[in-house]
Image (tube, rainbow, N blue to C red):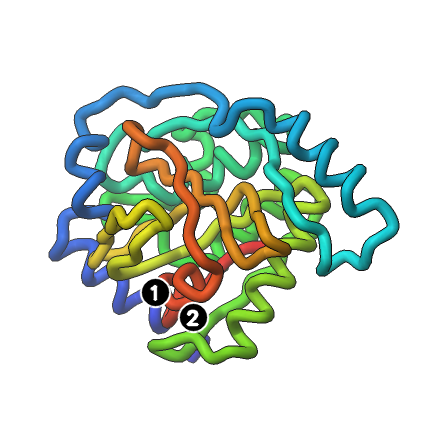
Amino acid sequence: MNHILHKSGLSVAGLLVAGGCALGPAVAAQAAPAQTGPTTSNQADKANKADKADKGAPHDRRAERQVGVEYQAQPNFFYCGPAATRIALSAQGKALSQDDVAALLGTTEAGTPSALDTTRVLNELTGGKYKTTEIRDSVAKPEQVDELRTNVLKALDDGRPVVANVKGTAVDTNGNPHSYEGGHYVTLVGYRDGGDLIQIADPADPTDGEYWMPVGKVANWIAERGYSS
């Protein structure tokens, strides 16, 4: 049996019990209409400064990158997968509706099955550069953290936001917890400090929209699931 699909099956069962693909902040997002707007200010300026500062430097030593995306909050409790995937697609000029993305993903009220589906749809719509990486362990190993950092840097330097399937609770750099015990999808849209810090666009958090988290915490958040990069 395919491991990531097996884990997804367990996750979907959790989604059904928990009432959706997001808990906590999603309660506020559930009844809210989708909100549109840039995830960051002066993204182009920051990217250009990073390019100038690190011109000629090895790929993994770039200091900072933030990819310009169009943020939309998920409009209901089970659209985290479509919303996160749509945010990633917007960086490449793909202005699909969340309903269109949900249809491609096979999203139901049980959620979006796995990172295999987000990878498949991203490749169908953007030319096939995405791949699925699974973190099978319950806690990410150091090499899996390093792999996530490398994959995020490469994808974002190519202008491709990363879609991650997460579960559990993780705390951002401001000390705010983000808890999704039933599972959730988020979009990784930027990095700082050479990839030690990752910027997250969270479709279930329309108040803040985005936050930063150390790459090790992001890897542990993805543990037992996977991501599309």
Find disc 1 in the rendering and name its residue: 8
Give residue 127's quadrant in the image. Answer: top right
Number of marks present in the image shown: 2
Q: Is residue 222 left or right of residue 177?
A: right
As drawn, is 27 to the left or to the right of 76?
A: left
- Which secondary structure lies at badge 1? helix
Which residue sits furthest front?
53
- Drawn side of residue 208 relative to residue 39, left or right: left
Q: Are marks 2 and 1 in contact (CB under 8 Å)?
A: yes
| Image mark for residue 4 | 2
167 or 119, which lies in front?
A: 167
In the picture provided, is 87 more to the left or to the right than 56? left
Report x, y in % for residue 161. Answer: 57, 43
Residue drawn at point x = 54 percent, y = 42 percent: 189
Work out whether residue 179 or residue 75 is closer to the camera in this orientation and state it: 179
Tell me the amino acid under the disc marked 2: Ile
Type of the residue with mark 1: Ser
Percent of width and height locating residue 193: 59, 53
- Residue lying at 30% horizontally and 54% vertically, measured from the top left: 171
Mark 1 Cα shell of 10 Å, populated few (<14), some (14-19), many (≥20) = many
